[in-house]
Image (cartoon, rainbow, N blue to C red):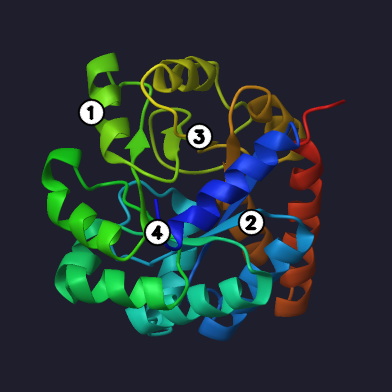
Amino acid sequence: MNGNVQLLSDTLAKAKAEDRAALVAYLPAGFPTVDGGIEAAKAVFDGGADIVEVGLPHSDPVLDGPVIQTADDIALKGGVKIADVLRTVREAHAASGRPVLVMTYWNPIDRYGVERFTAELAEAGGAGCILPDLPVQESALWREHAEKHGLGTVFVVAPSSRDERLAEITAAGSGFVYAASLMGVTGTRASVGASAEDLVARTRATTELPVCVGLGVSNAVQAKEVAAFADGVIVGSAFVKRMLDAPDHAAGLTAVRELAAELAEGVRRAS
């Protein structure tokens, strides 16, 4: 392992050594503005997030629920470009020294150029990419360039994934495995679902990679529940909702910083 993905692996290993799960926060680039999105990423790091996923806004975010879709729409109407996503990664990483990933659908990378995107993401200090809609069997070109530039490739597994499929997915990935806690789109939910714990156990049987759980976690109680069995807890819609609901940008930054602090407390497993 080399390059920027090493920081990601070291961060997850450090959390494990502290007997806790890592807190992974998701925020879309360009929301509410490019500068505002950068400030939000810095705020969640200030609050206690270990890792930040920067979303690349997409016009057809098939896996994202209404909250993230709303934020993506705002970012796209504001004219967000891939250069802005990379700037968000660069500034969030430079300010924190912590790992920053990009979460993106495949189409924008394909259009931008795989070699160009991986080179520029690595140069910006990015740790890698989460690619929810790139099938493993079609990922060879991406993985070749990602490896060349020291980037992690995080694939998503779901409760519907059969064991042999899990093994295929985890063998191709690096950094960590993103376990979607339930079927359906992103969004906060009253319960994270028992299927998540089973999925983590089945995924761990196929890989040494850390397994981080996302989809549905929105508060410290749920974060603690997931931290009991996962290596990382991924929270997105709850952060975005705090920003959307805030009366102004400054209040939004305070709200996401406070939520990160609450969740950071939640992922520390000891009661």
Residue corresponding to mark 4: 128
Please report the residue visible at 52 percent of the width from the left and 47 percent of the height from the top: 9
Camera-near label (2 vs 1) is 1
Q: Which of marks 4 and 1 is nearer the N terminus?
A: 4
Please report the residue visible at 60 percent of the width from the left and 77 percent of the height from the top: 94
Asked whether the residues under the numbered discs 1 and 3 touch, taking CB atoms below 8 Å apart as contact, a structural biologist would say no
Percent from the top left, x then y, of residue 202? 41, 16
Residue corresponding to mark 1: 168
Identity of the amino acid at label 2? Answer: Phe
Residue corresponding to mark 2: 239
Camera-near label (2 vs 3) is 3
Dot 3: element: loop
The crowding category of the residue bearing disc 4, from other C-alpha atoms within 10 Å (few below 14, some 14 to 19, many at least 20), is many
Please report the residue visible at 59 percent of the width from the left and 55 percent of the height from the top: 51
Q: Which of marks 1 and 3 is nearer the N terminus?
A: 1
Identity of the amino acid at label 4? Answer: Gly
140 on left or right of 234: left
Identity of the amino acid at label 3? Answer: Pro
Percent from the top left, x then y, of residue 211? 49, 32
Q: Which of marks 2 and 4 is nearer the N terminus?
A: 4
Camera-near label (2 vs 4) is 4
Percent from the top left, x then y, of residue 167? 28, 23
Residue 206 versus residue 230: which sits nearer the camera? 206
Residue corresponding to mark 3: 210
Q: Distance between the residues labelled 4 and 3?
A: 15 Å
Report the residue that reaches farthest toward the front. 2
Dot 2: element: helix
Above or below, 187 relative to 2: above
Q: Earlier in the sequence, mark 2 or mark 3?
A: 3
Above or below, 178 relative to 8: above
Q: Earlier in the sequence, mark 4 or mark 3?
A: 4
